[in-house]
Image (cartoon, rainbow, N blue to C red):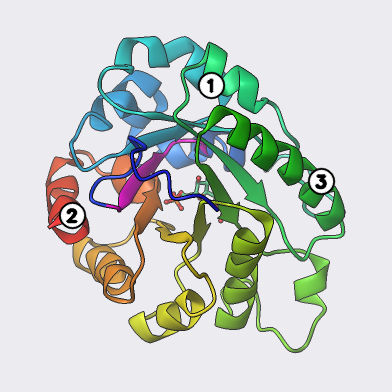
Amino acid sequence: MKEYSDSPIYRNGNLLILAYDHGTEHGPVDFEPNPDSADPKNVFEVAKHDAVTAIAVQKGIAEAYYSEYSDDVPLLVKLNGNSNLRDPKDYYSPKQCSVQYAVEELGASAVGYTMYAGSDYEDRMWQDFREVQEEARRYGVPVVMWAYPRGRGIEENSDYSGDTDTDVIAYAARLGLELGADVVKCKYPGSREETEKVLDVTGKMKFVMSGGSKRSDDEFLEDVQNTIDAGGNGLAVGRNIFQREDPTEILDRLEEVLYE
Ligand code: FBP
């Protein structure tokens, strides 16, 4: 990992990535609670809030919309992704974009890559990540690993209770450090204490919590506060922002938790 302390995706060392790749990962069903969120322009408008340090989108959304917002929010291009439509034998997330294209053509300040550790295809993903990580170093942009352990290796291992087992999250987070990510993004393990156990093994790498499905303001803010109190650096969040009709209030509160 590298510090990249002057990267625009950090504010006081912390970050809030507004994740908006759900049209690939989950499909339009995620826009139903707030139909305005189906139009990327509306979500780019939300990303202008000072609490947001980067917006994470796939290349097609970046190509079509980012030029209008490049003065307002740094861009993180999600380099791989997949849909929920197919029924894979096991999890694999193919690359659709190179770091070169993301930085030179789209204006990215950072790149993101989903790693499904525990899948039958983990070895292919390690190879893909290696290319991403080394190319990102050449361009001097931080790499955020979406560390999502899942697949047969975890499902069939009786030592683990699933992909939110703290040991599994900690293992996946550690892979981020070992493989050269600058920020690792993990599922919330359920409490401050469990988050501390994960952070015990992530070294100098930054750690952000994944937002997860929409919950009440208080429940969501408590999870974020616990992450910060445990020593984490923020969050990458989608549904808990864009599924709210007016996300300003929650972003104001997040700004206090993350940066003040
Ligand atoms: P949310 O805050 O909505 O959970 O978004 C974070 C994120 O990592 C997105 O980038 C991604 O689309 C989604 O979660 C994947 O969720 P999962 O694969 O766990 O269903």
Total numbered labels placed on residues in the image:
3
Disc 2 residue type (three-letter): Tyr
Q: Are marks 2 and 1 in contact (CB under 8 Å)?
A: no
Q: Earlier in the sequence, mark 2 or mark 3?
A: 3
Asked if 224 appears above or below 251 in the picture, the reply is: below
Q: Is 165 covered by the magenta stretch?
A: no
Q: Which region shows up in magenta?
A: 13-21
Residue 6 versus residue 92 in the image, above or below: above
Q: CA distance from mark 2 to mark 3?
A: 36 Å
Q: Quadrant of residue 48?
A: top left
Quick one: label 2, few (<14), some, or many (20+) residues within 10 Å?
some
Residue 249 placement (x, y as % from top left): 12, 47
Residue at 44%, 29% (x, y): give it: 109
Q: Nearer the viewer, residue 133 or 75?
A: 133
Q: Position of residue 245 (x, y in %)?
A: 22, 39
User: Which label sits on residue 127?
Assistant: 3
Which residue lies under the disc numbered 1?
A: 103
Q: Are marks 1 and 3 in contact (CB under 8 Å)?
A: no
Q: Secondary structure at mark 3?
A: helix
**What numbered label is drawn on residue 259?**
2
Give the amino acid at mark 3: Gln
Who's the residue at 51% across and 36% down the image? 21
Residue 81 appears in the figure: no
